[in-house]
Amino acid sequence: MKEREIVIIGAGPAGLAAALGAKDKGAKDILIIERDQYLGGILNQCIHNGFGLHRFKEELTGPEYAQRYADMVKSAGIEISDRTFAVKITNKKEIFCLKPGEMMKLKAKAIILATGCRERTREMIPIHGFRPSGVYPAGLAQKMINIEGWIPGEEAVIIGSGDIGLIMARRMIFEGMKVKAVIEIMPKSRGLRRNIRQCLEDFSIPLYLSHKVTKIHGKERVEKVSVCKVDESFKEIKDTSFDIKCDTVLVSVGLIPENELLEAAGGLIDKKTNSPVCLKPYQTSIEGIFSCGNCNKVYDLVDWVSRDSYEAGGLAAMYANGELK
Amino acid sequence: MKYDVAIIGAGITGAALARELSKYELNIILLEKEIEPAFGVSKSNSGIIHSGTQNPSDSLKGKLCVEGNRLMREEIAKDLGLNFIQCGQLITAFDEEEKKKLFEIKQEGEKLGVPGLEIKDRQWLNKNEPNLSKEVIAALFSPSAGIISPYRYVYALIENATDNGVILKTESKVLAIEQKGPKDFEIKTEKEYFKTSFVVNCAGLYAQEIAEMIGIKDIKIVPRKGEEYLLDKKRENISNHIIFPLPSKNSKGILMIKTSDGNPMIGPTAHEIEDKEDLSTTENGLNEVLEGVKRMIPSVDKSDIIAYFAGLRPSCGKDFVIRYEKNRDGFLNMAGIQSPGLTAAPASAAYAADILFKNGLSCAKKKNFKKYRQRPIHLFQIPLSKTEELIQKDPSYGDIVCRCEMVSAMEIRQAIKRGAKTLDGIKFRTRAQAGRCHGGFCTSRIMKILSEELNISPLEITKKGKNSNIIKRIK
């Protein structure tokens, strides 16, 4: 078991900023564990602009924003283990990781969790009906289109008007797909106002508020969805049902902090939000295990992830050298 | 060439028969309409290896179930490298009236030869099933019941059967069967013609259509839908046994099911429907399942659900119909194989083989029958120390593709070598995409591995064959 001062799990925007924060507060020995072969996490598939207005006072794309932080981390001489997958942590701050050809066993003075979040799925809502191909979490569709160059279908309906769903509406239009509707169960969209304007209104994509998808049709590939209006308690209003023909359904119904490592180590998790229970900022219920970025709480803007994670990294460094009481 | 036996349907019944007959010097062909085996009725099986209770003591299915259970415990799990877990089952009683019924079920079970049945009292339940509702006053304990992955059971049987010479043809829907004479049939599929001496109909929901092809009109299959809901692995220990209510007229009721992969499962509903492809789930089904299971385990919560699906039981009256058609010499029906068909499968296969031998099929045993099938490695089933050893031998066991279920690139490649062609095929074999994120993270990586191993374009990759392609264009 190799001893390390600070181990950060995840090299997305939160992990990279936390590493810089720890370094600036005097940490000498920092290791970032990253499962991908690139730094920057989900930013790499967010090729639209709008990032960095607060942090860098200019408008960047996701990959550009990620590159700035990757460069800072590299020039700070911080060690990174890529293609490395953390499978287990313990309350003694041991970390077990798998990578091709090797299992790494580490013991850290402080751990910083920067594991991000995952998308809620159709199963969690749940949306009933058939289970054909053509139903994608919006983030998966984004990865397929932007990273792989794979276009999922011809005609899409988007469930949920969160920012990823809105951005993907515009993205699919740019790729020559039709976006027939965005269906939102709430009376108001959760997405940023600028995204509603730039991604839906500019392309005349209808947004159905207070509506829900009641059934997905199609045995092999999606053929259509049934939609209806809902009342204040989200119950179907009779005789308002209609069908929309489509071969693709994107599900963009929110994000959940990814905290299974912490939970398995015995850390307390808020059942409602899946965030860690933190009595002091960024400190989980296990002493010496810190949490920042989207696995701590789901953010709207990456700029605030960077700001807060930098602070969390500093706290972890202070803890590791005994300054944090 | 003329085959000795053509088996129609590569679900659990056809797969078990193929493996049973592969012990003999026979030319056997196994025809499946889907792109992979187990994609019909078997894929939505609950995975329970029943003890044999809840069946009439004079029923064929009861006898075959008890024997199938014994075969699993004593031979098959070991021979085929299956992860069979003998967790036992409880049938619960909520009042004195129901408790009396437990004694009746016990008696009926004992007549069938179900081993070890015992009525357990509240004190035992407190200790051994702590999350059980306090309203339960007693339960019938059946220690021989257990759990298994239903599709991996089918895959194991087929791998072993093909290793012993059985020819498997997928995407081979049977379109017509012509009887040319006694023990002389010609089968037309979507792609080819086959001549064969014997035909066995294991076509599940479509057993009626297959029987009708040679003029047998009394096999009537009524699909009975069951919706099931899977809970997060975090709730693995919500129960220690499979827990049943008292059986109703049509089904064993809504259960708390343990699964061999860890995720508890709740369900199934039981509703007769008409469409043999209606695998949709419904709001009403979900509510019915939640209500039914909460009565027994009150701490089950809707937010624990991570996945759901529906399956169809191919019912044909009350019992299995395993019948040699004297007027269609050479034709054997295995129809109406609903629950406990998975448990009974190896016993049903031996029973069917015996009928075929009595009707003239050659029963010379193969000298070099390979009894064992190599167990696939699943990281989720082994401790980390073992994983470490594997990675040192083969680096790609350390290349994790599916984060929720910890599935490595090596396991995905092995699954493809063993026959997976689709995303669902990979999921059933390895669990990749079966966890809480539903493939949000790993789908594109799996598609790349499939494309590489099968040497096909990502455009050709499907979820489950036919028109279930994942992408439509490449930039």
Image (cartoon, rainbow, N blue to C red):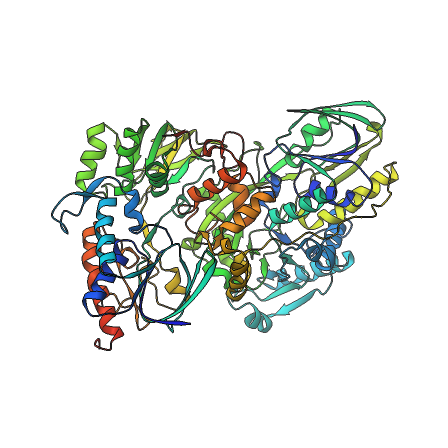
Side of B369 where B96 appears, left or right: left
The image quadrant that residue B335 belongs to is: top right
* Left or right, A258 with reference to B140: left
In the rendered image, the vertical position of residue A13 relative to residue A213, given as above or below: below
Position of residue B78 measured from the top left corner of the image (x, y, whole percent) = 69, 58
Can residue B133 be seen here? The reply is no
Q: Is residue B11 visible in the rendered structure shown here? A: yes
What x and y, as percent, mark residue B120?
A: 64, 69
Q: Quadrant of the N terminus of chain B?
A: top right
How many tags in the picture? 0
Q: Is residue B216 left or right of residue A38?
A: right
A233 left or right, relative to B371 = left
Q: Where does residue B195 sit, x and y in percent of width and height? A: 77, 26
- Where is residue A36? Give x, y as percent: 37, 51
Residue B175 versus residue A87 in the image, above or below? above
Q: Nearer the viewer, residue B135 or A323?
A: A323
At 45% from the left and 40% from the top, the residue drawn is B448
- Furthest residue in direction left, as rendered: A57
In depth, the one of A294 and B276 nearer the eye is A294
- Does residue A19 lie above or below A163 as drawn? below
